[in-house]
Amino acid sequence: MDGELAYRAVLAVDIERSAGRGDPALLAIRAALRTVLRESFERSRIDWEACRVDDLGDGLRVTAPAGARKAALVHPLFDEVAARLRAHNRLAGALTTIRVRMALHAGDVRLGPDGEVAGRPLEVLARLLDAPAVRTELAEAPPQTVAVLVLSEHFHEETVQPGRPGIEPETFRQVAVANKEFTTTAWIRTAPAEGPSEAAAPAVPAGAPPAGPSRMTNRATGHGVIYAVQNGVQHITTTRRT
């Protein structure tokens, strides 16, 4: 394919075990994944409408626009995707639960006149996404784990090693990748089963009063009025007969 040669970041996402769920469930999880990615890109300040999005059947491949910050595809994008998938799964049934593998790479690709993308970086991306080490990482993770991210050596060197804010190098570990004729090393990170803002709230005892200020008025014997507020404080006013 002839076309312009341009440096681009590329992302691939694959839904784990999407086969065998039936067409209604497959359509539902595909639509949910696209929504999750679009919202996550927007939160990461990467223009979703400027991206080239290709359907992979069980997932999507996204070619970021020129000038997109590669680091933003690691943070906050990965954490945004994980948070939204956890929220989706809390309401999903067995057939519509989503767990994904994600791969990131960058390089010179060919951009066709109609927006199509081709080139060696896409081959590398596909090998990373389908690598047995990456599949095993997600398959052996607890059910609450929704995503695994793998970075090429090149992508890791440019985005993780510098230690940018929000990106913690110690959360990545190096793995060997062997997929068909492709052999390399890559870096993998597993999303936590629960985000920092998703911790369970303290249980409220049954019958406990609602939070916030409250006031209760009761008639009392002896011609008085009792005004009770929260925390057990009472104000008693007596009235005299004239």
Image (cartoon, rainbow, N blue to C red):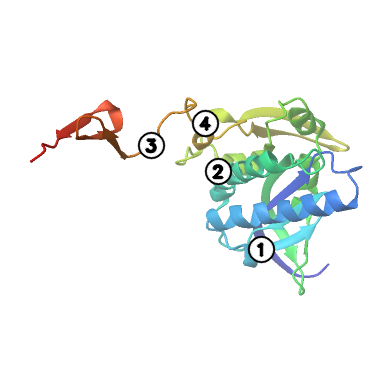
Identified by mark 3, the residue type is Ala
Give the position of the N terminus as an image quadrant.
Answer: bottom right
What crowding class fits label 2: few (fewer than 14 Cα within 10 Å), some (14-19), or many (20 or more)?
A: many
Mark 4 sits on what residue? 199
- Taking depth in this image into account, of 229 and 137 the one nearest to the observer is 229
Q: Nearer the viewer, mark 3 or mark 4?
A: 3
The mark nearer the N terminus, 3 or 4, is 4
Identified by mark 1, the residue type is Cys
The mark nearer the N terminus, 1 or 2, is 1
Quarter of the image holding residue 119?
bottom right
Quarter of the image holding residue 228?
top left
The mark nearer the N terminus, 1 or 3, is 1
Mark 3 sits on what residue? 211
Rounded to the nearest whole Å, what is the CA distance between mark 3 and mark 4? Answer: 19 Å
Residue 41 placement (x, y as % from top left)? 59, 55
Q: Tell me if residue 56 can be seen.
A: no
Rounded to the nearest whole Å, what is the CA distance between mark 1 and mark 4? Answer: 34 Å
Rounded to the nearest whole Å, what is the CA distance between mark 2 and mark 3? Answer: 44 Å
What crowding class fits label 3: few (fewer than 14 Cα within 10 Å), some (14-19), or many (20 or more)?
A: few
* Element carrying mark 3: loop
- Considering every residue shown, the one lying at the far front of the view is 242
Q: Residue at x 38, y 37 (%)?
A: 211
- Taking depth in this image into account, of 212 and 198 the one nearest to the observer is 212
Q: Nearer the viewer, mark 4 or mark 2?
A: 4
